[in-house]
Image (cartoon, rainbow, N blue to C red):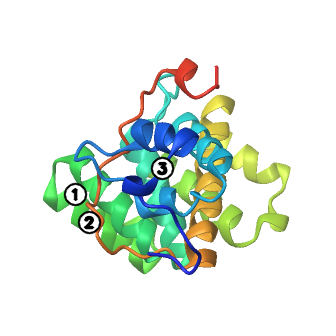
Amino acid sequence: MSWIDTISPKNAEHALATLYARVRAPDGHVDNILQAHSLRPHTLEGHMALYKAVLHHFRNTLSKAYLETIGVYVSLLNGCDYCVRHHAAGLERLLNDEARFDEIMSALRAGEPVRAFDRRARAGLDYVRKLALAPSDIGQSDIEILRDAGFEDGEILEINQVTSYFCYANRTVLGLGVSIDGETLGLSPNASDNPDDWGHR
C-alpha cells in the first residue's frame, strides 16, 4: 500500500481508530492516502481538515465540479496517477455527463484546457498550471488576469488553495509510494462538511 509501515483499520487503536471511524468512505474503506498517515495520526487529522476546508466546505462558491477539475489537472501535471484516478472518478460522478467528462479529461491530459473550457475557466486553469509547476514565476499580474476573467478575490483564493492542497497530496502519495491497491475510486471520505467537525471555521 505504501513504502512505509502503516496501521490498518482492523489493527487501529485509540486516537487512530477514532480518526479512521470519522474518515471512512461510504463503503467503509479508509483510503490508502489516509492510512499512510497512521504512524502520526495528528497529520491525518490535519490532512483531513485541509481537504475538507479547501475542496468540500459549504462556504466555497466555485462549483465542486470545477474544484475537482483543478484537482485532476494538478495531479496530471504532477504525474500522480493515484489522485488522478480518484478525483477523475469523483468528477465524473459530479458531472453525470459522460460526453462532457470525456471532453474535459481529453483536454486536461493534452494540456490544452482551451478545448473544453470558456475564457473564465481557462484563466483559472492557466493559473493552476503555473502555480503547480512554476510557483516562483507567479506575480501580481497573474491575479489581475484572474480578476479580468471574472473571478472575485475569494474565488481566486479557492483556486489557490485547491491547487496548493493537491500539490501537497500528490507529494504525499508520490513520496511515500501510496498505491491504488484495494481502493474504491471516487468516494469522498465519510466526514462532515460542517466546519466545526474538523476545526476550521
Q: Position of residue 2 (x, y in %)?
A: 51, 76
Secondary structure beneath dot 3 equals helix
User: Quadrant of the rendered structure where residue 69 is?
Assistant: bottom left
- Element on which disc 1 rests: helix
Report the residue at 50% width, 40% height from top. 19
The tag on residue 42 is none
Residue 116 showing in the rendered view: no
Task: Pick the residue in front: 149 or 12.
Answer: 12
**Location of residue 96 with respect to 77 vertically, above or below:** above
Task: Tell me how far mark 2 sits from mark 3, CA to CA.
Answer: 14 Å
**Mark on residue 100?**
1
Q: Position of residue 112 (x, y in %)?
A: 45, 73
- Depth check: give the residue in front, 6 or 167: 6
Q: Nearer the viewer, residue 14 or 84?
A: 14
Position in image of residue 73 (x %, y %) = 48, 65
Q: Amino acid at mark 3?
A: Ala
Q: Amino acid at mark 1?
A: Arg
Residue placed under numbered mark 3 in the picture: 121
Q: Position of residue 136 (x, y in %)?
A: 84, 66
Between the residue at mark 1 and the residue at mark 3, the CA separation in whole angstroms equals: 15 Å
In percent of the image, x 33 and y 75: which residue is there? 181
Instruction: Say which residue appears at 36% left-offset and 73% top-offset.
Output: 180
Which quadrant of the figure contains the C terminus? top right
Labelled pair 2, 1 in contact (Cβ < 8 Å): yes
Left or right relative to 128: residue 100: left
Closer to the camera, 10 or 42?
A: 10
Residue type (three-letter) at the residue carrying disc 2: Glu
* SS state under label 2: helix
Q: Is residue 126 left or right of residue 134?
A: left
Badge 2 is on which residue?
Answer: 103
